Image (cartoon, rainbow, N blue to C red):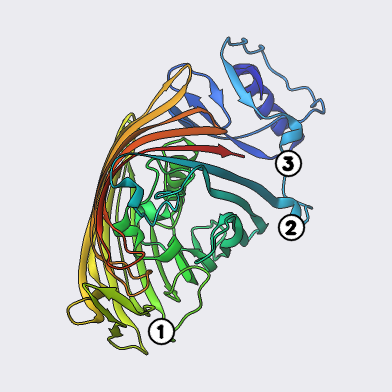
């Protein structure tokens, strides 16, 4: 990135634009409150100056001045002319961007019955495991027109149910945002996308500090996604805050609207509706910005619908039976509410979520799947600091959940109590390494007799961003 003296760059950008009298591509500038340097991208400790027009390479007509401005020793980060362009005249495919990330995992059992552990968030926990590719994502996105944006994301590391091989390609996101106003505050999202329920579920795995999402919230929507229609509203100031919380490295969850409402199938990503009844969801999240630059985000979500559970013959306590299901045609009652609070790590941070509701759960005594109450959540503390060797975020996370695992056959009851502590190291924007210790107590919901297993793990993840 080119750098120019502050006064000279500012004089050139403003003077040339005024002299030419033609519209120019404007760029955002930010000032570092400590070094007083000017940058073209947001970041920690940087304040927004405003939008400025960059000078072209063509010499501008002389501007009459009484004195030349003094050249400052401070610097400004300005993109070269070749990197700045307008969208006029571009074909739609020239406006698309490609990015992505890959995560490689390794888990080492260090105590208890760790070899028998099973976790919905990490299929590489358990017996006969080694290195595994947990995520291999490619994102194609961009503004196709002034009123429409697209987002397409496949995952190249999926494993279909029952498969003994890995690394299948499977669709994660495929949607269009249809902007309803020129300021892009209102939009309709159509397609397969994340369901706006729970803050951590909306946060990308690429940005999440802890290795896995908490089961209490993640058990609400399979793969966090479904097919539907959603209306989102984000006022301009709130949109800027959501964008900053992601670009600044503070691990934001993205812009899913200050307010959102939608309808979706309800069976999960890549699965058709099974009961001709749609789920509905309501979402609210507000990021406060204090005078000292600290961000605090609070919000609440709720959804309601009916979910059809898959059943099969099962043997528990010496009895073999196939569970019956209440309302087998319409599906089981499935509704929850959740609340979240996120105090962003500047440098100390804290986040927590809690959910309560009702959903399908296997009642072994009655040999049927019926609607039962559920509850759970998590709390996490973290501390973010930068060194000459990169950025570090040590963290500790506690989670608990009591409720049905509706995605699993027969919807067995899941009991989870888990504590994880670790550190994420980011030596550059392209590489992240996380190492954590986990003490897990969780039900193996994958197979009867649904035992509760205790185990301790050393967990590692290498992530590359591109």
Query: Mark on residue 85?
Result: 3
Q: Residue at x 30, y 85 (%)?
A: 325
Q: Camera-side residue: 316 or 119?
A: 316
Residue 39 lies, in percent from the top left, at: 56, 27
Q: Which residue is label 1 attached to?
A: 277
**Residue name at image x 74 percent, y 57 percent:** 92
Q: Does 156 appear above or below 2?
A: below
Q: Position of residue 221 (x, y in %)?
A: 39, 65
Q: Distance of mark 3 from mark 1, alpha carbons?
A: 47 Å
Residue at x 31% of width, y 60% of height? 444
Residue shown at the point (64%, 27%) measured from the top left = 78
Q: State the residue lying farthest toward the left.
A: 365
SS of the residue under disc 3: loop
Q: CA distance from mark 3 to mark 2?
A: 14 Å
The reply to whether residue 306 is in sight is yes
Per the image, the residue denoted by label 2 is 92
Q: Earlier in the sequence, mark 3 or mark 1?
A: 3
């Amino acid at each position: 990135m080119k750098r120019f003296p502050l006064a000279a760059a500012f004089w050139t950008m403003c003077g040339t634009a005024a002299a030419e009298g033609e519209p120019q591509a404007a760029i955002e500038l930010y000032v570092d409150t400590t070094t007083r340097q000017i940058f073209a991208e947001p970041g920690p400790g940087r304040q927004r100056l405003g939008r400025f027009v960059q000078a072209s390479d063509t010499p501008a007509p002389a501007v009459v001045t009484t004195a030349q401005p003094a050249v400052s020793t401070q610097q400004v980060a300005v993109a070269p002319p070749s990197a700045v362009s307008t969208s006029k005249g571009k074909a739609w495919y020239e406006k698309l961007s490609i990015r992505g990330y890959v995560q490689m995992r390794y888990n080492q059992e260090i105590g208890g019955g760790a070899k028998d552990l099973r976790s919905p968030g990490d299929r590489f926990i358990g017996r006969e495991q080694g290195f595994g590719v947990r995520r291999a994502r490619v994102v194609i996105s961009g503004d196709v027109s002034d009123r429409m944006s697209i987002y397409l994301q496949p995952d190249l590391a999926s494993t279909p149910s029952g498969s003994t091989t890995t690394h299948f390609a499977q669709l994660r996101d495929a949607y269009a945002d249809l902007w309803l106003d020129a300021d892009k505050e209102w939009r309709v999202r159509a397609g397969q996308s994340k369901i706006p329920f729970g803050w951590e579920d909306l946060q990308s795995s690429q940005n999440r500090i802890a290795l896995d999402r908490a089961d209490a919230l993640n058990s609400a929507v399979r793969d966090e996604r479904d097919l539907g229609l959603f209306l989102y509203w984000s006022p301009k100031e709130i949109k800027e805050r959501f964008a900053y919380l992601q670009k600044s490295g503070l691990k934001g969850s993205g812009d899913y609207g200050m307010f959102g409402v939608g309808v979706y199938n309800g069976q999960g990503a890549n699965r058709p509706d099974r009961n001709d009844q749609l789920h509905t969801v309501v979402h609210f999240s507000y990021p406060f910005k204090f005078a000292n630059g600290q961000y605090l985000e609070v919000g609440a979500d709720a959804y309601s619908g009916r979910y059809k559970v898959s059943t099969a013959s099962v043997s528990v306590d010496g009895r073999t039976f196939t569970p019956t299901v209440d309302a087998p045609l319409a599906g089981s009652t499935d509704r929850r509410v959740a609340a979240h609070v996120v105090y962003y790590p500047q440098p100390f941070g804290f986040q927590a979520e809690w959910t309560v509701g009702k959903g399908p759960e296997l009642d072994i005594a009655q040999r049927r799947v019926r609607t039962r109450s559920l509850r759970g959540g998590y709390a996490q503390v973290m501390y973010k600091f930068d060194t000459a060797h990169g950025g570090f975020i040590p963290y500790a996370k506690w989670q608990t959940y009591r409720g049905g695992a509706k995605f699993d056959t027969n919807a067995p009851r899941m009991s989870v109590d888990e504590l994880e502590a670790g550190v994420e190291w980011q030596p550059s924007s392209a590489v992240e390494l996380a190492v954590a210790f986990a003490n897990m107590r969780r039900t193996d919901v994958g197979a009867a007799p649904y035992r509760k297993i205790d185990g301790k793990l050393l967990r590692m993840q290498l992530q590359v961003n591109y």
